[in-house]
Amino acid sequence: MLIFPYNSAWVKDFELIEAKLLDASNDIHVSVEHVGSTAVPGLDAKPVIDIDIVYNKITDFEAIKNGLQSLGYYHNGNQDVEGREVFKRQEKAQDEILDTIVHHLYVCHNDCAELHRHLLFRDYLRKNETTRKFYQNLKYEIAHEAKDNKKIYATIKEVKATSFVNYIIELSRLGL
């Protein structure tokens, strides 16, 4: 099963990770955003916590990167998304929180377009129950079509959900 019923523990999981990330921020002003489906109350989701660390000054990136490396992350480039840097766990890292809660970690400058897409979509789903339910049903349909295969799910979701997500982001930008 890929999609799980909403679990309020996802908020606590995020908060546990957030505390670790803030501790390693090297006194740089950052915010840590819970994005993705697990950040939307009532939305069934893959149990993966998506996190964006947001910073303001371009010159702060190296210090943030060093702080994350001290926690056992490595920088995995931007994976073709300008302004969004991907960080993954090193296999030898040992942390009872960071290595047991499945999560994706991104570091974004505050003017990163993808960051703003994450926030607009998350916030729209939080405020619009009908849209949230439609998106949830779409995810279940995709999971069924993919026969719960993660890679196939990601490929189908890229095709089927992208236009829906773009539409919702545009509605959000228009204040609708």
Image (cartoon, helix red, strand yellow):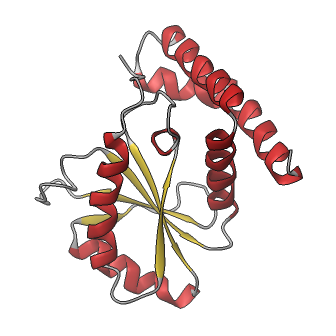
- Quarter in which the C terminus is drawn: top right
What x and y, as percent, mark residue 52?
49, 61
Residue drawn at point x = 61 percent, y = 42 percent: 126
The answer to whether residue 174 is left or right of residue 16 is: right
Q: Quadrant of the N terminus?
A: top left
Residue 3 locus on image (x, y percent): 42, 22
User: Could you tell whether 65 is left or right of 113 in the image?
Assistant: left
Q: Position of residue 169 (x, y in %)?
A: 76, 45
Count of residue discs: 0
For residue 95, side relative to residue 138 (left or right): left
Q: Nearer the viewer, residue 42 or 90?
A: 42
Residue at x-position 62% and y-position 23%: 133
| Foreground residue among 133 and 29 | 133
Query: How far across and how far down the image is residue 167, in percent?
Result: 81, 37
Residue 63 is drawn in which quadrant? bottom left
Q: Is residue 23 above or below residue 89?
A: below
* 1, 44: nearer the viewer: 44
Q: Establish if 15 lies above or below 126.
A: below
Q: Quadrant of residue 159?
A: top right
* Rendered residue at 45%/30% (across/down): 45
Query: Where 74 falls versus 176 (above or below)?
Result: below
